[in-house]
Image: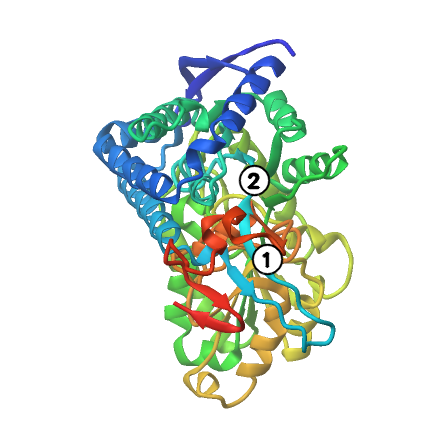
Amino acid sequence: MAAAPVWSVDPRTGKQREQVAVEATAQEVDTAVRAAHAARGALADRTVRSAFLRSAAELLEGAKDHLVEAADAETALGPVRLTGELARTCYQLRAFADIVDEGAFLDVVINHPDATATPPIPDLRRYKVPLGVVAVYSASNFPFAFSVAGGDTASALAAGCPVVVKAHPDHPALSEFVAATLRRAAEQHDIPKGVVGLVHGFEAGVELVKHPLVSAAGFTGSVRGGRALFDAAAARPVPIPFHGELGSLNPVVITEAAAAERAEAIGTGLAGSMTLGVGQFCVKPGLVLAPTGAAGDRLVKSLTDAVSDTDAGVLLDHRMRDNFVAGVAERAELPDVDAPVTPGAGSEHTVSPGFLTVPAGRLAAEGEHDLLLEECFGPITVVARYEDDSEAGAVLSRLPGNLTATVHLSAEEAAGEGRGAELLAELTPLAGRVLVNGWPTGVAVAPAQHHGGPYPATTSTSTSVGGTAIERWLRPVAYQGAPEALLPAELRDDNPLGLPRRFNGRLER
C-alpha cells in the first residue's frame, strides 16, 4: 500500500491548503492498533477513565478558538455552528464520564444458589466487560460530534475500550489537532497516548476493520462505503460487531387537517430544517408527504417563499457538490416532477437550495421514480402530493429504514381525534425516532435519545447518541460458582464499589 500525502483542502475554493500527513501503511495501522490494545489495562479503573473524559472536555474547550478556526477552514460550516458543535462534543464527553461514575451500564446481576427452583439455580454473577479496541470511522458533516472526539470515541472510551480513528479526508488537520488533545488528556492520567490512535487513507480504513485485534467498529457515512466495511467485518475469520449509520430519507407526513390549520408555519419550518447546515444533516427531511388541495398549495407556497430567501452555501467538498448537482438534475428530469425552487449549482463553489414536487401516485409503485426515494445529500427535499390517506400509506409502505419519521397533526388529531395514533403506528416500523409536530434536525444528547433505525439507516439496533450508546462496546459475562475472593469487585456481595445492581431479584440503587 503506497503512502500518499494527505492535504487539508479549502471547500470554498477547492484548493489545497497544506499537507497534513500521509496515508497510513498497513504496518502503521498495525502499530496503531497494537498500541491501542496495549493501553486497555490503563482504562480498567472507572475513576481513571471518567477523569480522562472530563480532562478531554476541558482541554478541547481550552483550545476552542484554534479548533473552530481549523474546522471552519476545512469544512466551511461557520464559526457559530462549529462552536455549538464543539460545546455539544464536550458535553457528551462529560455525560459519559457521569455514566461511568454511576456504573449502571455494567448491568450487575447477582443470584445466590436456590435449590428449590426448577431447575436449581447455582451461584451466578453477571456483568458487562469491554470488547477491546474499537475502530471509529469519522463522519464528514460533524467534524467534532461524529469525528475523532465524537460519540463513538466517547462511548467506547467510557466502556473501557481504546480507539483507533480513521480520520475523514474532509478535515484531516482538525483530526490531528483533536487527537493530540485527547492524547494530552490521557497522559494527565498516566494513560498511554496510544489509547487514541489516528490513521488516514481509504486503504487504512479497510486494513483497520480487518485487523485481528480490532473488536468492534463504529461508522457514520454513505450506504456504499458503510456496507463495504460492514461486509468486511462480517467476512473476517472472527466477525466483529459493526455499528454503521449509512443513510436516511427521514420521511415527513403532513395531514390535511394540519395543513389546513397551519400551512404557512409548516412550510417555513420545513424550509429551515431541510436547508440547515446546507442540507448536510443526517436527519434532514428528504421526503415530505403533503396533501393536494388548497391547504397543500398554501404549504407549498410558504415553502417556496422561505427556500427562495435562503442563500446558497458551500458543501463539505467538491465531490459532494458534484454529486448533489448531478443528483438534482437526474431527479428533476423525471416525468411529472416540478421544481418550484430549482436546487443545484450556485456559484462555482456553492449550491442553491430548492425542492421538487411529484404526485404521490408516482411513488406508490416500483418504477423510475424510485430515485426520489433515495437520499440526496444537500439542500433538497421532495414533496409528494397525495390525494388521500391510502395513497400516502402506499408510499410509506415502500420506504426503507430511516433514522427519523415525522408526522404533523392538527390540534384535534394530536388530542386523539382522527388518525393520529394510527399514523404513529404506521411510522414506528420505519424509524428509530418518531416525531410529532416538530422537525428531525437537532439530535439532543439525552439518556432517552435513540439515533439509529432499521437498515439502511443503521446496521444494528443500537444508538450512536445518548447514554445507551455505551452498550455497543460491551459484552456480558457470567461467573458460576466462583469463590468470593476470586470475583471482580463489581460482583462481590458486599458491593465495595457501591454499584446499582439486581441482587437476588431485588433492584438495589
User: Where does residue 484 sit, x and y in percent of width and height?
Assistant: 52, 53
Judge whether residue 400 can be spotted in this image.
yes
Q: Are the residues tagged 2 and 1 within 8 Å (C-beta)?
A: no
Residue identifier under label 2: 219
Q: For residue 220, which quarter of the picture?
A: top right
Q: Amino acid at mark 2?
A: Phe
Query: Residue at the spot x=61%, y=56% of the render?
Result: 461
User: Where does residue 296 sit, x and y in percent of width and height?
Assistant: 50, 72
Local crowd size for mark 2, using a 10 Å CA cut-off: few (<14), some (14–19), many (≥20):
many
SS class, disc 1? loop
On screen, residue 489 versus residue 77, left or right, reads right
Give how far apart the Cα atoms at labels 2 and 1 are. Answer: 14 Å
Residue identifier under label 1: 453
- Say how the picture is coloured: rainbow
Q: For residue 299, which quarter of the picture?
A: bottom left
The N terminus lies in quadrant: top right
SS class, disc 2? strand
